[in-house]
Image: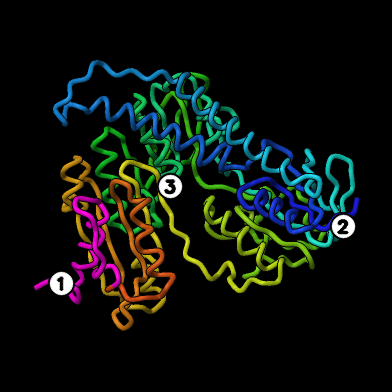
Amino acid sequence: MNVDVVIVGSGQAGVPLAVRLAEAGRRVVIAERQALGGTCVNYGCTPTKMMVASAHAAHVARTAGRFGVKAGRVTVDMAAVVDRKDRIVRQWRDGVRKRLQRAAPRLTLVRGHARFIGPRSLDVAGERYEADVVILNVGARPARPPLPGLDGVPWLDNARIMQLRRVPAHLVVLGGGYIGCEFAQMFRRFGAKVTVVDRGARLLSTEEPEASAALERVFRGEGIRLVMKARARSVSGGAHAVTLRLDGRKKVTGSHLLVAVGRRPNTDDLGADAAGVRLDAKGYVEVDERYRTSADGVYAVGDCTPGPQFTHASWDDHRILFDLLQGRGRRTRNDRLVPITAFTDPQAARIGLTEREARARGLAPETATMDFGKIARAVETDQTAGTMKILLDPKTERVLGASIVGAEAGELIHIFGPVMVAGVSARAIVDGEYVHPTFAEGVQSLVMSLKRYAVE
């Protein structure tokens, strides 16, 4: 079958691209071999944040005494938590299906594995499809480390752990990144004993050291054991106990093991060679600033490309590429700021550069930090844990980066986004009017703590 566009994958870039291109008059085929919606809907944002919300509810109930509220013994019905999560996932997935259906007949959904058999030519479930434009949105999956003994134990990834219908007695988390931290705190609040093992010196090692330290204090305060600077060497055990052996003859034994050491792109069975699509050493599709691959007419978006693996980045990929395909776009994948947030409690968010990254580029930023506990709203709501940091270009007064660990940090970080995109001075934040008492006025206080903006 000859069509105008073939899109492989129904993730957060693929679906809106398919719909909008169809509405623009193109004949589009979108192929999906698994559940509609990609990682975000099925194994990522939607289910994890619902389970984070359940864990937060348990934590608030358990600690209500700090507000003068007495609650009885708190128990967690893990099966009910999972059922709620699955119900909403089905609802979101059904929404994706209906969205695709509304774009018919110009848009056709084909179920099955897509594989290149030639330039801009793919086989999907035994049918051949050729198009002027092919867009890869094949996503990524949890990485499996080459850890001796892993095949012999019932280890968990981020998808399988969300199917547990009983709270683990002791969850061992291998990996202290975003995914590992979210699940560690989540299951600690569900009632499990939790140990986090990471080979790095600190949690969230790509973030500011102040951010890592603030989150580590919270984790230890909640009873999460942190085993840092520890390299896993092997794993053994069975259905009821799993032992992770570390350097120096150390070991950690738990009832369950979650492996959260990164992700790998779903490109090994794509037939990239047949299409002339070049992959990098890690299997990611190499693209330029306009999402073009090494093969003429083939583009790639989302988590299968090098770069930030976040739903909002993938969705933004679709906006940029749609405009480029329509011949009207000027913005590229390099012309954007991607804010990030770990949905721990408190949340950890950042936009722009860290101080280490700024100095590596030869910049000498003016910096300021402030304890989140200095915000009136944080004191009033007993959410004082956290810290904030800003990096300013001393010559232009432009914000180079900002980091927030604190309540609703994922919302607050967006105060900096428009200011940074517009390239205006941070004085725009200083001169703004902020409602009291809100967390947002704390961001203004952070900026005003820079020497140049200090109130005498």
Residue found at the very far left of the displayed protein = 456
Q: Residue at x 44, y 43 (%)?
A: 175
Residue 272 placement (x, y as % from top left): 77, 56
Q: Which-is-in-front pick, marks 2 and 3?
A: 2
- Report the disc number at residue 454: 1
Q: Earlier in the sequence, mark 1 or mark 3?
A: 3
Q: Is residue 305 magenta?
A: no
Q: Earlier in the sequence, mark 2 or mark 3?
A: 2
Q: Quadrant of the C terminus?
A: bottom left
Residue 393 placement (x, y as % from top left): 32, 77
Q: Which residue is mark 3?
A: 177
Residue found at the very far bottom of the displayed protein = 395
Q: CA distance from mark 2 to mark 3?
A: 38 Å
Residue 427 placement (x, y as % from top left): 27, 73
Q: Residue at x 25, y 54 (%)?
A: 387
Q: Is residue 241 above or below residue 351?
A: above
Q: Is residue 362 above or below residue 66?
A: below
Side of 98 relative to 84 (left or right): right
Q: CA distance from mark 2 to mark 1?
A: 63 Å
Q: Is residue 221 above or below residue 242?
A: below
Q: Which residue is mark 2?
A: 118
Residues in magenta? Answer: 428-456
Q: Is residue 418 above or below residue 28?
A: below
Q: Is residue 455 magenta?
A: yes
Circle 3: element type: loop
Question: Which amino acid, by three-letter code, is at mark 2?
Answer: Gly
Q: Which-is-in-front pick, marks 2 and 1?
A: 1
- Crowding around mark 1 (Cα neighbors within 10 Å: few <14, some 14 to 19, many 20+) is few
